[in-house]
Image (cartoon, rainbow, N blue to C red):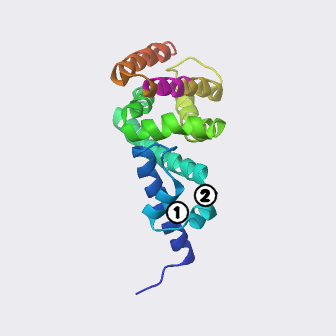
Amino acid sequence: MQRKSREEMIASTRARLIAAARLAFGQKGYAAASMDDLTAAAGLTRGALYHHFGGKEGLLEAVVQQIDGEMRTRYEHEFAAAGTNWTGFKACAHAYLDMALDPETRRIVLQDAPAVLGTRFREIDAASSLAPMTESLSKLMDSGEIKRAQPEALARQINGALVDAALWIASVETPESALAAAREAFDVLVDGLRLKQN
């Protein structure tokens, strides 16, 4: 049997801790998931958690980044399936809002992460969302489909609106109704940017 390299062992340890944390945070919430429970579920020690993530908060950040990566993959599929830059842009925004209905994402990303990570949560979200949104808006401007504005400034404002709407959806008693309202309001907001209809 071939022995694992140091890099493979590190990756395996990190993956086990992230998987255990994601399950616990999704089911119990961040506050109720103890570090002893997390490390026991992963078959590791507290020392491993501290070594790789610096503590429970660092582990939450890693879980959020993993979920964020999965969302980026979903955006890519949504955009590709949409057919045009404009419909792809809107499909990705709708997919972002839709995530507020997923119980795991709602609890970890939209409820616990903002409370625990504070401004770091906004930085993580911006790092994954702003560059592709800025690029998408630039293409729409260059093709004459939307009004011109500084692309990053516009992306930041739209992204801020989406984050706030997703947080709202995740916090209300009737999230399905809030999602429908948020989707409709988003379309009203961004349709005002259009210069031509396709």
Q: Is residue 195 visible?
A: no
Q: Secondary structure at mark 2?
A: helix
Relative depth, front residue between 53 and 73: 53
Residue interval drawn in magenta: 161-169
Label placed on residue 44: none
Where residue 161 sits in the image (x, y, percent)?
54, 22
Q: Is residue 14 visible?
A: yes
Where residue 100 sits in the image (x, y, percent)?
41, 31
The residue that disc 2 covers is 53
Q: Magenta span has 166?
A: yes
Image height of 132 relative to 66, above or below? above
The residue that disc 1 covers is 14
Pointers 2 and 1 in contact (CB under 8 A)? yes
Image height of 17 relative to 160, above or below? below
Tell me the amino acid under the disc marked 1. Arg
Q: Secondary structure at mark 1?
A: helix
Residue under the point 37% across and 36% down: 102
Residue 171 image-quadrant placement:
top left
Residue 19 image-quadrant placement:
bottom left
Relative depth, front residue between 19 and 65: 19
Tell me the amino acid under the disc marked 2. Phe
Residue 187 image-quadrant placement:
top left
Category of crowding for the residue at label 2, using alpha-carbon neighbours closer than 10 angstroms: few (below 14), some (14–19), many (at least 20): some
Which residue in the rendered view is the most extreme toward the bottom?
1
Q: CA distance from mark 2 to mark 1?
A: 8 Å
